[in-house]
Image: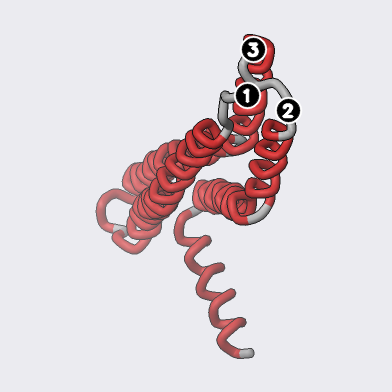
Amino acid sequence: MFWLTDAIEAIRDFMSLGGPVLKAIAVAIFLMWVLIVERILFFRSAMRDQARKIHDDWESRSERRSWHAHQIRELMISRFSLSVNRGISMIQTFVALCPLLGLLGTVTGMIAVFQVLAVSGSGNVRAMAAGVSQATVPTMAGMVGALSGVLFVTLLTRRAAREVEFLEDTLTMDH
Protein backbone atom coordinates (compact mmCIF):
# COMPACT_ATOMS: atom_id res chain seq x y z
CA MET A 1 0.00 0.00 0.00
CA PHE A 2 3.00 2.27 0.50
CA TRP A 3 3.76 2.15 -3.20
CA LEU A 4 0.38 3.72 -3.94
CA THR A 5 0.93 6.65 -1.59
CA ASP A 6 4.46 7.06 -2.98
CA ALA A 7 3.10 7.10 -6.53
CA ILE A 8 0.41 9.64 -5.66
CA GLU A 9 2.99 11.83 -3.93
CA ALA A 10 5.35 11.61 -6.93
CA ILE A 11 2.52 12.61 -9.29
CA ARG A 12 1.54 15.51 -7.02
CA ASP A 13 5.17 16.72 -6.92
CA PHE A 14 5.47 16.45 -10.70
CA MET A 15 2.23 18.37 -11.21
CA SER A 16 3.43 21.17 -8.92
CA LEU A 17 6.69 21.44 -10.91
CA GLY A 18 4.86 22.31 -14.12
CA GLY A 19 2.48 24.92 -12.84
CA PRO A 20 -1.18 25.37 -13.79
CA VAL A 21 -0.67 24.60 -17.49
CA LEU A 22 0.45 21.07 -16.63
CA LYS A 23 -2.99 20.42 -15.13
CA ALA A 24 -4.62 21.39 -18.44
CA ILE A 25 -2.22 19.09 -20.29
CA ALA A 26 -3.08 16.26 -17.90
CA VAL A 27 -6.80 16.77 -18.52
CA ALA A 28 -6.26 16.82 -22.30
CA ILE A 29 -4.18 13.64 -22.20
CA PHE A 30 -6.73 11.93 -19.96
CA LEU A 31 -9.62 12.82 -22.27
CA MET A 32 -7.61 11.74 -25.32
CA TRP A 33 -6.93 8.34 -23.76
CA VAL A 34 -10.56 7.90 -22.71
CA LEU A 35 -11.54 8.38 -26.36
CA ILE A 36 -8.78 6.04 -27.58
CA VAL A 37 -9.86 3.28 -25.18
CA GLU A 38 -13.50 3.80 -26.19
CA ARG A 39 -12.62 3.35 -29.87
CA ILE A 40 -10.54 0.24 -29.15
CA LEU A 41 -13.43 -1.29 -27.21
CA PHE A 42 -15.83 -0.32 -30.01
CA PHE A 43 -13.66 -2.06 -32.61
CA ARG A 44 -13.50 -5.19 -30.45
CA SER A 45 -17.23 -5.51 -29.80
CA ALA A 46 -19.96 -3.25 -31.13
CA MET A 47 -18.44 -2.70 -34.58
CA ARG A 48 -18.49 -6.41 -35.40
CA ASP A 49 -22.16 -6.68 -34.42
CA GLN A 50 -23.01 -3.61 -36.46
CA ALA A 51 -21.16 -4.89 -39.54
CA ARG A 52 -22.81 -8.30 -39.21
CA LYS A 53 -26.28 -6.71 -38.96
CA ILE A 54 -25.65 -4.53 -42.03
CA HIS A 55 -24.37 -7.55 -43.95
CA ASP A 56 -27.37 -9.68 -42.94
CA ASP A 57 -29.83 -6.88 -43.82
CA TRP A 58 -28.24 -6.48 -47.23
CA GLU A 59 -28.10 -10.20 -47.99
CA SER A 60 -31.76 -10.63 -46.96
CA ARG A 61 -32.87 -8.20 -49.67
CA SER A 62 -34.46 -9.91 -52.63
CA GLU A 63 -33.31 -7.28 -55.11
CA ARG A 64 -29.80 -5.76 -55.11
CA ARG A 65 -29.18 -4.51 -58.65
CA SER A 66 -31.38 -1.46 -59.10
CA TRP A 67 -30.40 2.15 -58.59
CA HIS A 68 -32.59 2.21 -55.45
CA ALA A 69 -30.82 -0.85 -54.01
CA HIS A 70 -27.45 0.74 -54.80
CA GLN A 71 -28.45 3.89 -52.88
CA ILE A 72 -29.55 1.80 -49.90
CA ARG A 73 -26.18 0.01 -49.98
CA GLU A 74 -24.36 3.36 -50.04
CA LEU A 75 -26.47 4.57 -47.11
CA MET A 76 -25.61 1.47 -45.08
CA ILE A 77 -21.90 1.89 -45.81
CA SER A 78 -22.01 5.62 -45.00
CA ARG A 79 -23.72 5.05 -41.66
CA PHE A 80 -21.18 2.37 -40.82
CA SER A 81 -18.33 4.70 -41.81
CA LEU A 82 -19.70 7.47 -39.59
CA SER A 83 -20.03 5.07 -36.69
CA VAL A 84 -16.53 3.65 -37.12
CA ASN A 85 -14.88 7.08 -37.49
CA ARG A 86 -16.79 8.74 -34.64
CA GLY A 87 -14.43 10.28 -32.09
CA ILE A 88 -11.26 9.92 -34.17
CA SER A 89 -11.26 13.59 -35.17
CA MET A 90 -11.58 14.54 -31.49
CA ILE A 91 -8.58 12.34 -30.67
CA GLN A 92 -6.65 14.08 -33.45
CA THR A 93 -7.63 17.42 -31.92
CA PHE A 94 -6.26 16.40 -28.53
CA VAL A 95 -3.05 15.14 -30.17
CA ALA A 96 -2.61 18.56 -31.78
CA LEU A 97 -3.61 20.40 -28.60
CA CYS A 98 -1.03 18.75 -26.31
CA PRO A 99 2.10 20.36 -27.83
CA LEU A 100 0.34 23.72 -28.02
CA LEU A 101 -0.47 23.53 -24.31
CA GLY A 102 3.16 22.55 -23.71
CA LEU A 103 4.24 25.67 -25.57
CA LEU A 104 1.89 27.73 -23.43
CA GLY A 105 3.59 26.22 -20.37
CA THR A 106 6.97 27.19 -21.79
CA VAL A 107 5.86 30.78 -22.25
CA THR A 108 4.32 31.08 -18.78
CA GLY A 109 7.42 29.51 -17.21
CA MET A 110 9.71 31.91 -19.03
CA ILE A 111 7.54 34.82 -17.87
CA ALA A 112 8.10 33.58 -14.31
CA VAL A 113 11.88 33.49 -14.95
CA PHE A 114 11.84 37.03 -16.33
CA GLN A 115 9.83 38.26 -13.34
CA VAL A 116 12.45 36.80 -10.99
CA LEU A 117 15.20 38.44 -13.03
CA ALA A 118 13.38 41.77 -12.93
CA VAL A 119 12.86 41.67 -9.17
CA SER A 120 16.06 40.11 -7.84
CA GLY A 121 18.50 40.28 -10.73
CA SER A 122 20.50 37.30 -11.95
CA GLY A 123 21.79 36.41 -8.48
CA ASN A 124 18.79 34.37 -7.29
CA VAL A 125 19.40 31.08 -9.08
CA ARG A 126 17.00 29.11 -6.88
CA ALA A 127 14.05 31.34 -7.77
CA MET A 128 14.97 31.16 -11.46
CA ALA A 129 15.11 27.34 -11.31
CA ALA A 130 11.43 27.16 -10.39
CA GLY A 131 10.53 29.20 -13.47
CA VAL A 132 12.79 27.10 -15.71
CA SER A 133 11.15 23.96 -14.34
CA GLN A 134 7.74 25.49 -14.96
CA ALA A 135 8.87 26.18 -18.53
CA THR A 136 10.33 22.77 -19.41
CA VAL A 137 8.06 20.26 -17.66
CA PRO A 138 4.85 21.24 -19.54
CA THR A 139 6.73 21.17 -22.84
CA MET A 140 7.92 17.66 -22.15
CA ALA A 141 4.49 16.52 -20.94
CA GLY A 142 2.77 17.98 -24.00
CA MET A 143 5.17 16.24 -26.35
CA VAL A 144 4.90 12.90 -24.55
CA GLY A 145 1.11 13.14 -24.60
CA ALA A 146 1.06 13.97 -28.30
CA LEU A 147 3.48 11.20 -29.19
CA SER A 148 1.47 8.63 -27.27
CA GLY A 149 -1.67 9.70 -29.10
CA VAL A 150 -0.15 9.89 -32.59
CA LEU A 151 0.55 6.17 -32.73
CA PHE A 152 -2.92 5.17 -31.64
CA VAL A 153 -4.80 7.71 -33.77
CA THR A 154 -2.89 6.41 -36.80
CA LEU A 155 -3.75 2.81 -35.94
CA LEU A 156 -7.40 3.67 -35.32
CA THR A 157 -7.70 5.66 -38.56
CA ARG A 158 -6.21 2.81 -40.59
CA ARG A 159 -8.41 0.24 -38.87
CA ALA A 160 -11.54 2.32 -39.53
CA ALA A 161 -10.70 2.69 -43.22
CA ARG A 162 -9.95 -1.02 -43.50
CA GLU A 163 -13.24 -2.00 -41.86
CA VAL A 164 -15.29 0.29 -44.10
CA GLU A 165 -13.51 -1.05 -47.17
CA PHE A 166 -14.08 -4.63 -46.04
CA LEU A 167 -17.79 -4.00 -45.54
CA GLU A 168 -17.99 -2.37 -48.95
CA ASP A 169 -16.35 -5.39 -50.54
CA THR A 170 -18.60 -7.92 -48.79
CA LEU A 171 -21.90 -6.31 -49.75
CA THR A 172 -22.48 -8.01 -53.08
CA MET A 173 -24.40 -6.35 -55.91
CA ASP A 174 -25.81 -9.48 -57.63
CA HIS A 175 -29.39 -10.83 -57.88
Rate crowding at label 1 as few (under 14), some (14 to 19) or many (20 or more) other CA atoms within 10 Å: few
Spatial separation of the CA atoms under disc 1 and disc 3: 10 Å
Position of the C terminus by quadrant = top right
Lateral position of residue 127 relative to residue 12, left or right = left
Spatial separation of the CA atoms under disc 1 and disc 2: 9 Å
Image vertical order of residue 96 relative to residue 71, above or below: below
Position of the N terminus by quadrant = bottom right
* Depth check, front residue: 102 or 17: 102
Q: Which of marks 1 and 3 is nearer the N terminus?
A: 3
Q: Mark 2 points at which residue?
A: 61
Q: What's under tag 3, amino acid-wise?
A: Ser
Rate crowding at label 3 as few (under 14), some (14 to 19) or many (20 or more) other CA atoms within 10 Å: few
At mark 2, the secondary structure is: loop
Instruction: Look at the image and tell me whether residue 20 can be seen.
Output: no
Image vertical order of residue 100 relative to residue 11, above or below: above
Q: Which of marks 3 and 2 is nearer the N terminus?
A: 2
> Which of pointers 1 and 3 indicates the residue nearer the eye?
1
Q: What's under tag 1, amino acid-wise?
A: His
Q: In which quarter of the image is residue 70?
A: top right
Q: Name the residue under label 3.
A: 66
Residue drawn at (51%, 69%) of the image:
13
* Depth check, front residue: 3 or 18: 3
Which of the labelled discs sits on residue 175, or is there none?
1
**Horizontal and vertical percent position of residue 87:** 60, 38
**Horizontal and vertical percent position of residue 44:** 60, 56
* Depth check, front residue: 95 or 168: 168
Whether label 1 touches label 2, CB < 8 Å: yes
